[in-house]
Structures are given as C-alpha cells and as structure tokens.
Image (tube, helix red, strand yellow):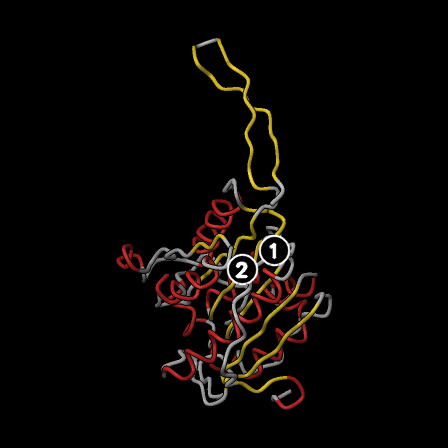
C-alpha cells in the first residue's frame, strides 16, 4: 500500500522543536455521516454504520438535540438548532485525520433526510442517501420542530406539488451535483409519495439518481423485512458508490446481498 510522508515539527521545549516525518496510508478514507429521524436516535443507524466501518469507511452517528440524553429538549428544539447539530457533526467527521474531506457521504431518514438535503448547500457532500425525507415550509424556521405539524398543516402540505423555488431544501437538491439514493416506503402515510416526487424532480443536476421503493413498508420500517430491505439497498449503494470510488488496493467491498426486497426503476411508482 502506498504511503504519504509529511514533515512535522514536534515541540519538546517552550521554544524548541525537533523535525520528524509522519508516514500514513497514501489513501484517505471516505467518511459517512448518519442523521436519524425525529423521535429516533443514533441507534437507528449504528448497525449499518458498523457494516460500513468494517469495510473501510469512517462512520459517525450522533443524537440530535431533543433526543436520547437530551430528551428534555424535545418540545423546544427548532430546525435552526438541528442544523447547528448536523453542521457540527459534519465538521467533526471531516476534521478526522484519516478522513478524505472531499469524499463524504451523508445518510438521513425522514427529518434527518430533510436536514441532510439542507446540509448539501452548506458543506461539500459527494454522496447523499435519503430515506423518506420529510418536507417542511420555510416559514417558522425558529419555531420548535414539535409544533410544525399543526402550525404548517403538514398533512395537506405534503400532498402538494412543491417546486424548488418554493422550498429551501428542494433548492439545495436542485444544486446538488453528487450521487443520490432516494428511498420511499410504499405505504408511508407520514411522508407520502408526492414528497418523494418533489425531491426526485429536484435532483436534475445530480451525477446519478437511484430510486427505490420498499414494498409494503410503512414510514418507520416497523417490520424486520422492511428493515432488512432498507439495509440491503443502503449498504449495496454505498458500497458501489463510496467503496467503489477507492483504489483497488484499499477497497474491500462487502459481498453482494442475497435478498432484494424492493421495486425500482420503471416498475416503481413514478
């Protein structure tokens, strides 16, 4: 494996340094940031992150404020604060010495997918995987997120066609030029098909867009079959995109999955 040599100065006294050479693997490692949905926590993605870490990615999961240890903030956290959370998590991952900051994937579900879409307008993202990404009106940005469903009449809003010029998240998708995975649950009553269609139609500048529908699944992927199907889709896609982009010397993709429980392409709902 090739290596990188980097001259370093090592401080030994207040005003004295010695010269050294730091040698490290020649190829930096892709990073993958996972963003859970509203009402969940980082456990939503830990097993999938472990699978990818075992194959050579640096993965980061985290708990948005208002969840897990900070559950007491659930009713007061706003989208503005959630965006600060995801930006801090991204910057932490990108700053790791082994991570290639030009090769970062972001994976988000529901509310986390919405935040991940917004993130692409603020930080470099090469690969973007969204499962049932939610959509909100741009107004009431600082209002507690827990109040948005009623304040914005989201049940009706999410059944409307929304253009990129009407949504900050969709404008970010319109400008995104990386690779995209968009996953829909067939029986999703919280994020209906129209929301997925809005996102799908916004990704016109993407390098590639992969669209999958998990048959029979609800929004939360409540049954084991739906969970396995999503894991299959996500890990397969990330392996092809993230690990496949690495050199043959460093890539070690997992074996192909034995199940494929989704509909895709022309056979999926358009």
Point out which mark residue 125 bears: 1
Give x and y (percent) for residue 80: 47, 54
x 56%, y 65%: residue: 238
x 49%, y 65%: residue: 108
- For disc 2, the marked residue is 106
Query: Is residue 20 at least partly visible in the picture?
Result: yes
186 horizontally vs 67: left or right: right
x 45%, y 59%: residue: 54
Nearer to the camera, 214 or 63: 214
Do tag 2 and tag 1 residues touch (Cβ < 8 Å)?
yes
Give x and y (percent) for residue 168: 60, 62
Relative vertical location of residue 34 with respect to residue 6 in this rendering, above or below: below
Packing grade of label 2 (10 A; few <14, some 14-19, many >=20) is many
Give x and y (percent) for residue 155: 47, 81
Nearer to the camera, 39 or 156: 39
> Which image quadrant: the N terminus?
top right
Nearer to the camera, 58 or 115: 58
Give x and y (percent) for residue 224: 37, 82
């Amino acid at each position: 494996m090739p290596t990188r040599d980097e001259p370093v100065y090592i401080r030994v006294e207040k005003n004295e340094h010695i010269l050294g050479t730091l040698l490290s693997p020649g190829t930096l490692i892709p990073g993958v940031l996972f963003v859970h949905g509203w009402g969940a926590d980082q456990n939503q993605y830990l097993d999938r992150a472990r699978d990818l870490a075992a194959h050579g990615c640096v993965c980061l999961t985290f708990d948005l404020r208002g969840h897990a240890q900070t559950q007491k903030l659930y009713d007061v956290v706003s989208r503005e604060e959630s965006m600060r959370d995801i930006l801090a998590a991204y910057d932490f991952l990108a700053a790791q010495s082994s991570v290639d900051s030009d090769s970062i994937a972001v994976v988000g579900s529901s509310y986390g997918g919405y935040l991940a879409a917004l993130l692409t307008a603020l930080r470099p993202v090469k690969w973007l995987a969204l499962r049932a990404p939610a959509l909100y009106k741009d107004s009431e940005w600082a209002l507690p997120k827990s109040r948005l469903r009623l304040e914005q009449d989201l049940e009706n809003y999410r059944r409307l066609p929304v253009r990129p010029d009407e949504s900050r998240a969709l404008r970010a998708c319109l400008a995104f030029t990386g690779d995209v995975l968009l996953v829909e649950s067939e029986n999703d009553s919280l994020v209906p098909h129209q929301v997925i269609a809005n996102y799908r139609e916004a990704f016109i500048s993407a390098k590639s867009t992969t669209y999958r529908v998990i048959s029979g699944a609800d929004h939360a992927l409540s049954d084991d079959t739906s969970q396995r199907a999503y894991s299959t889709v996500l890990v397969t896609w990330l392996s092809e995109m993230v690990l496949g982009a690495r050199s043959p010397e460093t890539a070690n993709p997992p074996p192909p999955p034995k199940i494929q429980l989704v509909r895709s392409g022309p056979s999926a709902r358009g």
